[in-house]
Image (cartoon, rainbow, N blue to C red):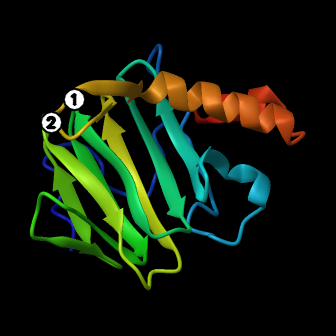
Amino acid sequence: MPAPMEKGDNTATAYRGPKLPNVPEDIVVTDALNLQCDERLWVPQAPDVWFRPLCFNVSHGYFVNILRVRKNGILSRHRHTGPVHATVLRGRWHYLEHPWWAEEGGYAFEPPGDIHTLEVPEGVQEMVTLFHVTGAYIYVDPEGTALGVEDVFSKLEAARKHYEEVGLGAAFADQFIR
């Protein structure tokens, strides 16, 4: 049972006051977990790797997406500049540097500064994970030398390019910007 409100009316009456200034509209993706959605919604990231954007928060430097991987082996080695939250929807994966496994129905928190190598093991036909990524991924070699960067801006650019190419129009990605 929800805690009672300390002040004010807690009846089922919608707020009737003025909208606060500069508050953006909500993002509602009604079929976000429909993994059989229109294939055009999946943005290619690498061979056999796609992401489906849910939010590009350009003012706070984070993005939320669903990552779909249909291959085994090493996906990437990277360092996080901000925290990452991951919820596994299908399959499993792990980091070579850690003893734990991210498995279907599980959640993982990855702290800023963590460097790890993501592997999808043999026998996993498809790995699908919901990621909330703040900051950037810095792709690195085994010694930590930076090789590339991915952040909310590069993800947005990739989505706009893809949606233009598949006939949805580049502006289709703008619905996810906040």
Q: Quadrant of residue 87?
A: bottom left
Q: Is residue 68 left or right of residue 90?
A: right
Regarding residue 173, the answer to whether it shows in the image is yes
Q: Secondary structure at mark 2?
A: loop
Q: In the rendering, at what x and y percent does residue 167 appear? A: 90, 39
Q: Classify the position of the N terminus by image quarter.
A: bottom left
Q: In the rendered view, would you say 42 is above or below 68?
A: above
Mark identifier at residue 113: none
**Is label 2 in contact with label 1 (beta carbons under 8 Å)?**
yes
Spot the residue most to the left: 99
Q: Is residue 114 left or right of residue 68?
A: left
* Residue at image point 11% right, 62% down: 98
Residue 112 - label: 2
Residue at 45% in and 70% down: 72
The residue tagged 1 is: 81
Mark 1, secondary structure of its residue: loop
* Residue furthest right in the image: 167
Q: Residue at x 76, y 27 (%)?
A: 171
Q: State how far apart marks 2 and 1 are (Cα).
A: 5 Å
